């Protein structure tokens, strides 16, 4: 298993990602779409999720494929981002055919970033236009860190952000992850710069720091660092493998392990932790059992890496309530390396 050429979820052929944000608002939207409808599924393990159209992703529902997946800031207001995406897709002639009408299928999930220092005094909900702008920006290349749905995200003690990573398996199947990290828990170990995801890092993609020589006290009892409902990590894992919705859901469930590897603690009653799967179906599974097993493993590894990359890539902005990783640790590490 090795990273894809971009080390982004768009290493899965046919996928495109777009970001849109408002710096004054300190919030934004990220959209994943594809050249054609794709199979999707979802796993929700957090206690405070905010979602749109996730019920239709169950294997027994009529609609088996979707046109886009949306990750958005804005808490419940951010659910309107999916409406903006649906409008853009409808204008492009995309959507589930019902007679002579097309209805774009756009599930989405939101995170809470309403207390991050941004100007939230708007009167017209900004998330519909942000969703449409993110769709218009969708392409194979996109930026990480303080971008899109990760623009105003935070975690314990640091700014959060938008992250992505990919892996190409020996079989040639590609797996990728995309995540907006707004966690209650910590992505770094104790008070240091090292990431919990360090054992799964590839090619020093988030600093190559490894784990500290001494890990924190295993009896540590964390206290909530955010108000109830103010934390969530929302993610998408993707593959070019041909999966039905049941197989895609198992991949999403397995990917949740990556969240638990990278954020301590995860899946709390106060988080809305959620993982979507997107499967384009370009490659048949040679062995449905063994290949499904490997897809789950790769998805978990990619998601852990993407979470660390999100925080590592975040950058400071005026009015931030928390420092970014680079400002807190980056300069000191650079000095130590030069010394």
Image (tube, helix red, strand yellow):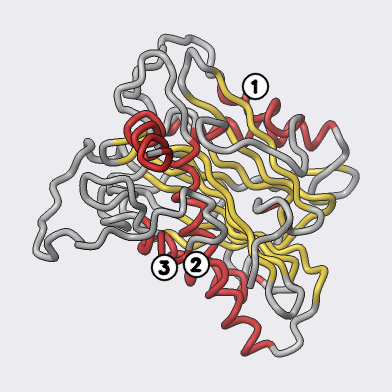
- Left or right: 266, with 153 as reference point: left
Residue at left offset 48%, top offset 43%: 310
**Number of labelled discs?**
3
- Left or right: 228, with 28 as reference point: left
Q: Quadrant of the N terminus?
A: bottom right
Q: Which residue is mark 1?
A: 129
* 47, 22: nearer the viewer: 22
Residue at left offset 40%, top offset 54%: 209
Q: Residues within 10 Å of mark 3 (few under 14, many from 20)?
A: some
Q: Earlier in the sequence, mark 1 or mark 2?
A: 1
**Mark 3 and mark 2 residues within 8 Å of each other at the beta carbon:** yes
Question: Distance between the Cα atoms at labels 3 and 2?
Answer: 6 Å
* 135, 167: nearer the viewer: 167
The secondary element bearing badge 3 is classed as helix
Residue at left offset 55%, top offset 41%: 71
Question: Distance between the Cα atoms at labels 1 and 2?
Answer: 32 Å
Q: Residues within 10 Å of mark 1 (few under 14, many from 20)?
A: many
Residue at left offset 52%, top offset 54%: 204
Question: Distance between the Cα atoms at labels 3 and 1?
Answer: 34 Å
Q: Give the quarter of the image for residue 2.
A: bottom right
- Left or right: 219, with 57 as reference point: left
Judge whether residue 259 can be spotted in this image. Answer: yes
The spot of residue 194 in percent (x, y) is 34, 51
The spot of residue 120 in percent (x, y) is 41, 14
Q: Which residue is mark 2?
A: 300
The spot of residue 257 in percent (x, y) is 41, 68
Q: Earlier in the sequence, mark 3 or mark 1?
A: 1
Q: Earlier in the sequence, mark 3 or mark 2?
A: 3
The secondary element bearing badge 2 is classed as helix
The secondary element bearing badge 1 is classed as helix
User: Against 333, is 12 above or below?
Assistant: below
């Amino acid at each position: 298993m090795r990273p894809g050429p971009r080390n982004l979820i768009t290493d899965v052929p046919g996928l495109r990602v777009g970001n849109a944000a408002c710096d004054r608002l300190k919030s934004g939207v990220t959209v994943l779409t594809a050249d054609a409808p794709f199979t999707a599924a979802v796993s929700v393990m957090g206690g405070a999720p905010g979602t749109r159209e996730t019920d239709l992703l169950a294997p027994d529902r009529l609609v088996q494929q979707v046109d886009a997946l949306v990750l958005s800031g804005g808490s419940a207001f951010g659910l309107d981002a999916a409406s903006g995406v649906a409008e853009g897709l409808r204008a492009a002639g995309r959507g589930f055919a019902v007679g002579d009408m097309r209805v774009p299928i756009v599930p989405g999930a939101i995170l809470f970033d309403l207390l991050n220092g941004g100007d939230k005094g708007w009167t017209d909900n900004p998330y519909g236009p942000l969703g449409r702008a993110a769709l218009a920006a969708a392409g194979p290349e996109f930026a990480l860190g303080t971008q899109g749905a990760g623009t105003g995200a935070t975690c314990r003690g640091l700014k959060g952000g938008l992250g992505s990573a990919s892996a190409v398996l020996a079989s040639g199947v590609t797996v990728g992850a995309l995540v907006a990290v707004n966690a209650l828990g910590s992505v770094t170990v104790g008070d240091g710069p090292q990431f919990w995801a360090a054992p799964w890092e590839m090619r020093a993609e988030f600093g190559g720091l490894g784990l500290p020589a001494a890990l924190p006290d295993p009896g540590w009892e964390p206290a909530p660092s955010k108000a109830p409902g103010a934390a969530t990590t929302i993610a998408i894992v993707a593959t070019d493998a041909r999966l039905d919705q049941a197989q895609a859901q198992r991949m999403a469930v397995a990917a949740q392990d990556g969240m638990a590897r990278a954020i301590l603690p995860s899946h709390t009653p106060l988080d809305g932790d959620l993982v979507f799967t997107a499967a384009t179906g370009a490659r048949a599974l040679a062995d449905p059992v063994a290949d499904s097993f490997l897809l789950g493993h790769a998805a978990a590894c990619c998601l852990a890496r993407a979470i660390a990359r999100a925080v590592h890539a975040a950058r400071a902005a005026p009015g931030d309530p928390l420092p970014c990783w680079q400002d807190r640790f980056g300069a000191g590490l650079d000095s130590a390396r030069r010394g």
